[in-house]
Amino acid sequence: MAKGFKGEVKIKVEGETYTLRMDLNAMASFEDQTGMAALDWAEKVEEHKALVRDMIKMVSCCLERHHEDAGKFLAGDILSEDPGILERLFTAAAPKPDEIEGQPGK
């Protein structure tokens, strides 16, 4: 069965483990909060041209599923701990060609 567009990454920050989930809900939340198209913005991340404030916002959106009550500084702390977390999240979420075989819209 195909995995779809969702991926999770766990990270430990200051003794606590957090689970970030990149999925369409996180991306829609990012779009609602920033007015930017998430997939277009993801290209900026890959090119190392994304603004830090937007990176923090996306990490915050990826925390929403499992850590709804996360404080406003946690996303920045996570990025400080692991600056490559967004790239890892996009990699975890993006389906590989062999995982979408036979799926509609392939």
Image (cartoon, grey):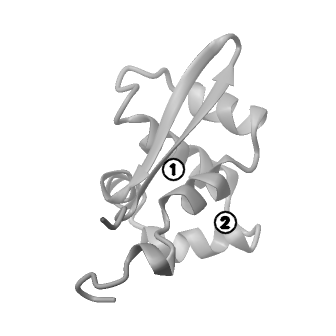
Q: Position of residue 12 (x, y in %)?
A: 66, 23
For this view, does 17 lie left or right of residue 3? Answer: right
- The residue to which callout 1 is attached is 58
The image quadrant of residue 56 is top right
Please say if 101 is above or below 56. Answer: below
Q: Quadrant of the N terminus?
A: bottom left
Disc 2 secondary structure class: helix
Where does the C terminus fall, quadrant-wise?
A: bottom left
**Number of numbered discs visible in the structure rendering:** 2
Residue 90 image offset from top left, x and y in percent: 56, 60
Location of residue 19 with respect to 84 vertically, above or below = above
The residue type indicated by label 1 comes to Met
Secondary-structure class at tag 1: helix
Q: Which residue is mark 2?
A: 45
Residue 43, how many percent across, how many down?
A: 61, 75
Q: Nearer the viewer, residue 29 or 93?
A: 93
Identify the image quadrant of residue 62: top left
- Mark 2 belongs to which amino acid? Val
> In this view, which residue lies farthest toward the bottom?
106
Q: Position of residue 19 (x, y in %)?
A: 50, 32
Of the image marks 2 and 1, the number of the one nearer the N terminus: 2
Residue 11, placed above or below residue 88: above
Q: Which mark is residue 2?
A: none
Front one among 66 and 80: 66
